[in-house]
Image (cartoon, grey):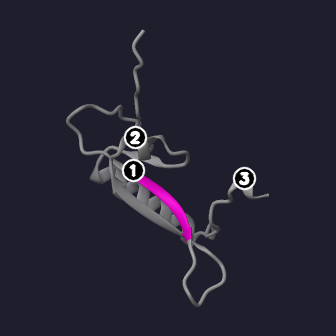
Amino acid sequence: MAWVERFTCDVCGKLMGEAESWWVAAIDCETAANQSPSHPVLKLMPWDNLLGHSAGNKHLCGAVCAHTFLDRWMSEFHAGADDCPRDPSAS
């Protein structure tokens, strides 16, 4: 039996095809040298299968959905959701 892997865009729900330019978005935490609390940082990377499998990473089917995702992420940040994601294994 063959293994079939399918990815869908986390913004529009489109299935990944062979000739598309997909991206992976990841949210990490970074602390500036003069700041004690961490702040979320959005990283946008060209598609990579290993990154696509990483827990929490978002799959984006192209520039329009990447822009939409960035806009939503920025809106959430300005609405007060500025905490870094918590690592469940850190408790």
Range of magenta residues: 25-29
Q: Secondary structure at mark 1?
A: strand
Q: Residue at x 51, y 66 (%)?
A: 75
| Residue 84 horizontal/vertical position (percent) | 62, 66
Q: Amino acid at mark 2?
A: Cys
Identity, as a three-letter code, of the amino acid under mark 3: Pro
Q: Are marks 2 and 1 in contact (CB under 8 Å)?
A: no
Q: Position of residue 9 (x, y in %)?
A: 40, 40
Looking at the picture, does residue 83 appear above or below residue 68? below
Mark 1: amino acid: Val
Could you tell me how many numbered marks the image carries? 3
Up-down: is 55 above or below 81?
A: above
Left or right of 42? Residue 78 is right
Residue 65 is marked as none
Q: Which comes before the other along the chain, label 2 or label 3? A: 2
Residue bearing the label numbered 2: 9
Is the stretch drawn in magenta largely helix, strand or loop?
A: strand
Q: Residue at x 35, y 45 (%)?
A: 48
Residue 39: x %, y % from top left: 58, 74
What residue did someone put label 3 on? 88
Alpha carbon of mark 2 to alpha carbon of mark 1: how far?
10 Å
